[in-house]
Image: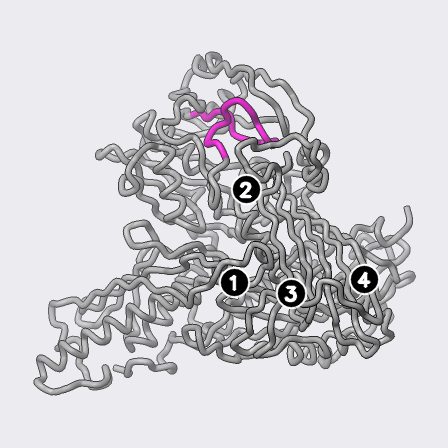
Amino acid sequence: MTGALSTTIAGGVGTSPTRPDGALKARGEFAYSSDLWADEMLWGATLRSPHPYARIRSVDISQALALPGVYAVLTHEDVPGENIYGLEHPDQPVLAVDVVRYQGEPVAIVAAEHPETARRAADRIVVDYEVLEPVTDAEAARDAGAPVLHPSNAGGNVVRHVRIRRGDPDPAADVVVTGEYMVGMQDQAFLGPESGLAVPAEDGGVDLYVATQWLHVDQQQVARALGLPVESVRLHLAGVGGAFGAREDLSMQVHACLLARHTGKPVKIVYGRAESFFGHVHRHPAVLRYEHGATREGSLVYVRAEIILDGGAYASTTAAVAGNAATLGVGPYVVPHVSVDCWGMYTNNPPCGAMRGFGAVQAAFAYESQMDKLAAALGVDPVELRIRNAVAEGSVLPTGQVIDSAAPVAELLKLVRDKPMPPPLAAPVDLREMPGGVSNTTHGEGVVRGVGYGVGIKNVGFSEGFDDYSTARVRLEVIGGEPVVSVHTAAAEVGQGLVTLQAQIARTELGVPRVIIQPADTGVGSAGSSSASRQSYVTGGAVRAACEAVRSDVLKLAADRLGAPVSSLDEVDLVAVLGSAAVERTVEWRHRPTSALDPLTGQGNAHVQYAFAAHRAVCDVDVELGLVRVVELACAQDVGRAMNPDAVVGQIHGGSAQGLGLAVMEEIQLAGGKIRNPSFTDYLIPTVLDMPPMSVDVLELADPHAPYGLRGVGEPPTISSTPAIVAAIRAATGRALTRVPVRPEHIVDC
């Protein structure tokens, strides 16, 4: 057998083994949460408010109960525990009581023997509403005369106000540029809708099989709503069809459990695509006002920023998103004097929360647009301006935190800048390579090529003093005459490849080729959320630590049996040493502590790690019709250690695709607080025909504070790709383009 800490073992750290779920998903044989089934199963459905803001005068469920095949119709009066939940701040009712605050808010739930019967029953519920004028403008929500949507909130409609102050409050600069920018509401657009199966248990509890990002937080919220001890609510991770932040908050979890316990039968709930748009949070729309001052030589002197985030009807993670937008709000640049104010606001728009990039996306579009504007004012190359001001290891950020590991921002920019350009347009024209594609809108006339750049910064892990940890249980035993490692965590595999990585770490640490990853559930301690690019770092650290503990125990066992010290598993015949025994250890692992921000100045070591990526975008733009084709994306990213090189590149491609979507097509359209496009017909996401070829450079500059030196990978490419694409469209059109997504009417006067 190979020795411990082997980095060359097949399928170990630094290799790209085949994903255990890969072939099943490619063949359509993987079981997602929507595929769950149980004998005597009922189907659940939800009645949702058609109004963004209204008082509930009465709810009449009699006609729904009278429908044959209906087993239960429940309202807030049937919630046995607390009728309120929330990921960070409990402010959202399980079922609405006397007011609804957004279109789609759940009012009642139904269980029936057939899904169509459940839907018909929900339609029969009669709700008498007093419709109110919704608050749909986040800036107007700050006005003194605006209706207060949550009277119990001490800040009125302000969820959180974050202030960052550093340096001179009134600095002077030779060149000053200002800008106002807007970011639309982006959807996570995962393909697998919200779904799960709740099964009542003989002990009075419930087992919930569900697609989620954070099993233990779901468990706690469900238990409170059911009025049960936490241990009576057991969650099991079902197949997850994508997440990107939207599965951090509850959707159908409590509803399915309520119906299952009320009827005594298993209850399955599956949202349709339209309902999914109402059933989860979205990316915060934002208005961002920036002022940059610099010397004539191009050194940044100060940045002033005001950021308003529309958090929608309930808090979700708005407070944390505001913290990220503020602390990362000047970008990966050295700025001596900083004044940033970020507000997260309540409105009657759909709730907003976690989405890949988590506040850094909105800020990056603004500060990168400003860097291009400043470069034009100075008459310098936009890449050179970024390089001149780039942070590096040892730089001090606006929060006063010192970057204490590699920060190769300048190198990343040089890598993407120096890549060969794609070939220019040439006859004969292939319509598939034109803006507008095979719709035959142009044969090259009116098409102008532009090149743009973007770079971004993202924190990794939970921040601002949050107790961020993960738990791993590792067991080593002999099965069928060979050593086998079993790894059990509650970390959610949401498509990122975590199940593969856990096995890689176990192979590397214990030198055992055969590794079994147990299904994630709440039978082991919390692993935290599969978000914030944190699971490789935190759960990877926990698995590594548990393996180290197992290895230590095995070496002691071997030494006792051999009567001599043993220093390496290379010296151990595991089959002989273990026999019929098993060695098992459970470890709770934490990263370095972070600290809360000073409420007045925003100073503090808020983040545990920073990650950086840069993009160059090449776009062809039909300046007569306003159509855009992204010809190429080049990306360079420092990942610390490429734990699984193929998976790293896949994450960079996927993150870049979501950044492209925000740049040119993805937006939930709202009118008076109502969603106008809740479908993948009208809400557009990039397809394989929209994604251009990508050239990716991966740097491996180890972070000495992280397991294996790794950095979180998934979010940085989403941050820098959007501003790079918009910059390329600006270069082609000469338009200011201060809003994303960029629409044809922004390019062409209509």
Q: What kind of element bears circle 3?
A: strand
Q: Is residue 106 magenta?
A: yes
Q: Is residue 459 left or right of residue 171?
A: left
Judge by depth and name the residue closer to the eye, 661 or 598. 598
Residue 729, label in figure: 4
Judge by depth and name the residue closer to the eye, 395 or 494. 395
Q: Which residue is mark 2?
A: 315
Callout 3 amino acid: Arg
Q: What's the magenta region?
A: 92-110
Callout 4 amino acid: Ile
Pointers 4 and 2 in contact (C-beta within 8 Å): no
Q: Residue at x 18, y 69 (%)?
A: 478
Q: Which residue is mark 1?
A: 606
**Closer to the N terminus: mark 4 or mark 1?**
1
Callout 1 amino acid: Ala
Q: Quick one: label 3, few (<14), some, or many (20+) residues within 10 Å?
A: some
Q: Quick one: label 1, few (<14), some, or many (20+) residues within 10 Å?
A: many
Q: CA–CA distance between discs 1 and 3?
A: 15 Å
